[in-house]
C-alpha cells in the first residue's frame, strides 16, 4: 500500500486536492508545473521556536511539502528568543531566496528585515503571528498571512471548560507570549466567554511565553495560592500538559479541568486518557504546508500573478477535540447526526496529525 510519503508529485497534488487539504490552493493545481525543475527552489523558513511541539511538527510538514514540490528549505530556529529571531532574520535578509516564510515571536520585531526582502522582489509569507498590523503587512509587500482563527479556537475551548464548571468557580488563564498576535487572539477569545459568567472568577492571568518550565513555575505557585481552583485555560498544549503534571503532583486531577490549543498528538492522547478536558486543532501542517505552496507558486509564476491568485489572509482552521460528545446508542450507526461529527473517534485525529498534511 502506498503511503502519503511515497506519493510522487503528480499523485500528491491530485490526492491532496481530492482530500481538500490544499484549501485555497486547490484552484491553482492546474497552474503548478508537475515536471521537476532542473534545480530545486531555495527557501528560508523560521519558527518562533522548534522546541514548541507546534513548530516542530510544522517543520516536518514543510519539509515534506518541500520534498514533494522540489524545494530545499533552510531552517532558522527562533528558540523562543526575540533577539535570536532578529539575528536570524538579518541573516535571511542578507541572502537571496526563492521565497521566505516566517513565524514571528512578537508583532513589530521583524518589519525592517521583512521590507528589505520584499523590496528585492522576494516573496515573504507570514505564518501564524502578524509581522506587523495587517494594513502595514500589505504596505510592506508580504504576500499572504496564513493563520488559525485564534479567537474562535479559544472561545470553543473555554466554552467547554465553562460548561463543565457549571458557570461558576475559579479559572486560571496562562498566556503564550503577550506580543504574539495569536496569543492576543486567544486571550480575547478567553475573555469573550468568561465575561458572560459573573460567577466565574479569573484568579490568575500570566504569560507562560510558550515555555514549559515557566508554566510549571506559574502553576506551582497558582495551586498553592488557590487550592479551590476549578479550571485552567492555557494557550497551547505544551503548557497545558505541563500544568496537568503540576495538578497531578498536587493530587488535584479530579478537581482541576484543563484546556489547551493545538491538538498535538500527546494532547489528544491526554484527552483520550481524561487528563485534559479539551483542546482545539490548530493545524501546523496546514499553516506550514500552505506557506510552502504559496511560496512555490510565487517563485514559479512571479509575485504579481501570485498576488492575483492567493488571498492576502488565509485562515487554517481545525476542530474542537473533546471526549464530551453525544453517545446516544441509537446514533451509533448514523454518525453524521452527531453534533461534532467525528469526535467520538479521537484516535483518528492522532492518525491525521501524524500524516503532516491535514
Image (spheres, rainbow, N blue to C red):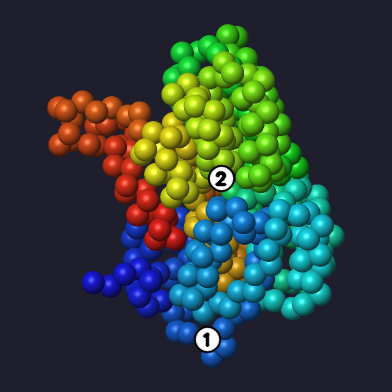
Which of the labelled discs sits on residue 37, or is there none? 1
> What is the quadrant of residue 139 in the picture?
bottom right
- Tell me the element at label 1: loop
Q: Secondary structure at mark 2?
A: helix
Q: Is residue 151 left or right of residue 268?
A: right
Residue identifier under label 2: 238
Give the percent coordinates (x, y) of residue 132: 76, 49
Badge 1 or badge 2: first in the primary sequence: 1
Q: Residue at x 44, y 61 (%)?
A: 356
Q: Residue at x 15, y 36 (%)?
A: 333
- Residue at 53% of width from left, 37% of height from top? 245
* Image quadrant containing the C terminus: bottom left
Structural distance between the alpha carbons of marks 1 and 2: 39 Å
Q: Is residue 202 above or below residue 16?
A: above
Judge whether 353 appears above or below 150 on screen. Answer: below
**Spot occupied by residue 320 in the image (x, y as percentages of width and height):** 43, 37
Other residues around mark 1 within 10 Å, as few (<14) / some (14–19) / many (≥20)? few
Amino acid at each position: 500500500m502506498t503511503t502519503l510519503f511515497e506519493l510522487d508529485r503528480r499523485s500528491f497534488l491530485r490526492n491532496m486536492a481530492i482530500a481538500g487539504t490544499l484549501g485555497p490552493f486547490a484552484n491553482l493545481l492546474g497552474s503548478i508545473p508537475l515536471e521537476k525543475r532542473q534545480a530545486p527552489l531555495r527557501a528560508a523558513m523560521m519558527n518562533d521556536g522548534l522546541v514548541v511541539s507546534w513548530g516542530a511538527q510544522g517543520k516536518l510538514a514543510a519539509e515534506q511539502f518541500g520534498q514533494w514540490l522540489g524545494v530545499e528549505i533552510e531552517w532558522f530556529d527562533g528558540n523562543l528568543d526575540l533577539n535570536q529571531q532578529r539575528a536570524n532574520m538579518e541573516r535571511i535578509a542578507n541572502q537571496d531566496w526563492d521565497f521566505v516564510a516566517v513565524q514571528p515571536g512578537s508583532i513589530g520585531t521583524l518589519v525592517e528585515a521583512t521590507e528589505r526582502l520584499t523590496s528585492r522582489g522576494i516573496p515573504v509569507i507570514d505564518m501564524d503571528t502578524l509581522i506587523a498590523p495587517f494594513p502595514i503587512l500589505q504596505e510592506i509587500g508580504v504576500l499572504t498571512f496564513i493563520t488559525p482563527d485564534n479567537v474562535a479556537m479559544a472561545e470553543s475551548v473555554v466554552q467547554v471548560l465553562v460548561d463543565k464548571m457549571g458557570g461558576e468557580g475559579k479559572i486560571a488563564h496562562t498566556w503564550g507570549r503577550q506580543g504574539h498576535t495569536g496569543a492576543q487572539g486567544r486571550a480575547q477569545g478567553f475573555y469573550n466567554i468568561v465575561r458572560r459568567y459573573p460567577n466565574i472568577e479569573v484568579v490568575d492571568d500570566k504569560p507562560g511565553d510558550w515555555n514549559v518550565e515557566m508554566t510549571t513555575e506559574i502553576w506551582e505557585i497558582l495551586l498553592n495560592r488557590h487550592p479551590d481552583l476549578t479550571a485552567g485555560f492555557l494557550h497551547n498544549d505544551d503548557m497545558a500538559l505541563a500544568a496537568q503534571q503540576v495538578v497531578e503532583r498536587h493530587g488535584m486531577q479530579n478537581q482541576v479541568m484543563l484546556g489547551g490549543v493545538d491538538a498535538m498528538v500527546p494532547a489528544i492522547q491526554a484527552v483520550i486518557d481524561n487528563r485534559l478536558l479539551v483542546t482545539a486543532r490548530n493545524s501546523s501542517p496546514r499553516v506550514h504546508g500552505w506557506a510552502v505552496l504559496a511560496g512555490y507558486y510565487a517563485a514559479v509564476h512571479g509575485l504579481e500573478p501570485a498576488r492575483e491568485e492567493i488571498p492576502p489572509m488565509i485562515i487554517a482552521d481545525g476542530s474542537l477535540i473533546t471526549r464530551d460528545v453525544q453517545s446516544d446508542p441509537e446514533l451509533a450507526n448514523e454518525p453524521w447526526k452527531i453534533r461534532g461529527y467525528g469526535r467520538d473517534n479521537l484516535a483518528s485525529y492522532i492518525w491525521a496529525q501524524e500524516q503532516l498534511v491535514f
